[in-house]
Amino acid sequence: MISSLFLIYAGLASQVSAACSRAALQDVAATYVQAQVSGKPTLLSLATNVSYGENDKPLDIAKGVLSQPITVDFNRSIYDTTQCATFTELTAATSKHPYVIHTRILLTEDASKITKIESVVTDSGDWAFNATGHLYWTRQEKWEPIPESRRNTRAVIQAAGDAYLDQWGNSTLPVPLGTPCARLEGGAYTGQSNPSANTCRMGAFPQPLKVADRRYIIDEELGAVDIFNGFPWLEATKPGGAVPSTNFIRVEGGMIRYIHEVTVCETPRCGR
């Protein structure tokens, strides 16, 4: 009897863990891309109380960028089976209105309904924005699955991303930057002149910056983490205030290989 009950419970546990499978999350991300291309958020399986926001502001999903058809030239997604969540980077360089969009999607435990969608939506005037440059460089990068025996843990991947952001507040802190390493900031690429070198190193900011409100999506198979955060850029209208930003990072062997930074400007001063 005990053995039978054990098998039943084990089967139920297996069903629960399989509900938020990688395949299910891949379907969600693919449908999200289709919804953005067509401008039809109704393609998504949304929970009744779904939360939608753009650039850290709540918004009616029917009035947001997701309701506008966009030509998506390239997209890359990661899948967090622990949180039951996805992250997708969209590059729309040839669209009538060019964008680079970072979107995180949170789902119910069985992956059947989307409970939250939040996007950092950048376009002309945002920090270092150049969708054409972003498209060119992101297509050159290799984000293949990492062999299981060489994958880092969630903790290692997150720690690498956190170390990169923590250094902005203290330039003496160590960051596991690999060689090679390249940073794509808006449309500017640090790996262009010497692709085999470590070009992710940064000098100290004029003043320490504390990066707060960090929200993570982590994918061990791709060695990737995306961190939504508030970047404390000195906006003219709110000195010391944070602006919507995300850092999409690839970690290989515990070392950072790629960094994609997307940051919104709220005043013209920021984008210059």
Image (tube, rainbow, N blue to C red):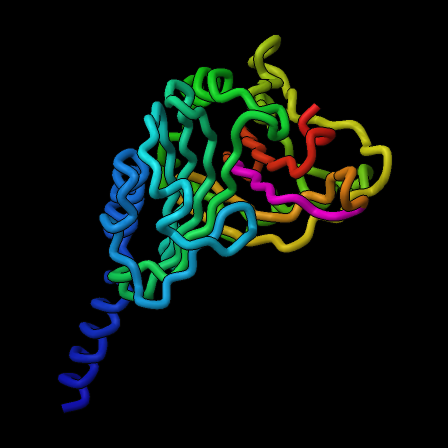
Q: Is residue 173 visible?
A: yes
Which residue reaches farthest bottom? 1
* Left or right: where 31 falls relative to 166: left
Q: Image quarter for residue 270?
A: top right
Q: Which residue lies furthest to the top in this view?
A: 193
Image location of residue 159, percent across then percent down: 61, 48
Q: Is residue 270 left or right of residue 44?
A: right
In the displayed structure, would residue 196 be above or below residue 62? above
Q: Which of 181 and 48 is in front in this view?
A: 48
* Residue closest to the eye, 8 or 28: 28
The quarter in which the N terminus is drawn is bottom left
Magenta highlight on residue 246: yes
- Judged left or right of residue 198, residue 98 is left
Question: What span is in magenta?
Answer: 240-249
Q: Residue furthest right?
A: 206
Q: x and y percent of residue 217 in the render?
A: 47, 50
Taking depth in this image into account, of 210 and 48 the one nearest to the observer is 48
Q: Residue at point 60% right, 53% down?
A: 214
Q: Nearer the viewer, residue 83 or 97?
A: 97
Q: In the image, residue 209 lies at what x, y percent?
A: 78, 43
Residue at the image point whose x is 74% and y is 48% from the top: 241
Residue at 25% in and 72% down: 13
Residue found at x 30% / y 43%: 32
Position of residue 68 relative to residue 214, above or below, is above
Q: Main secondary structure of the magenta part?
A: strand
- Asked if residue 256 shows in the view, the reply is no
- Asked which quadrant contains residue 109, the reply is bottom left
Instruction: Tell me, yes or no, whether the highlighted magenta stretch contains residue 169.
Output: no
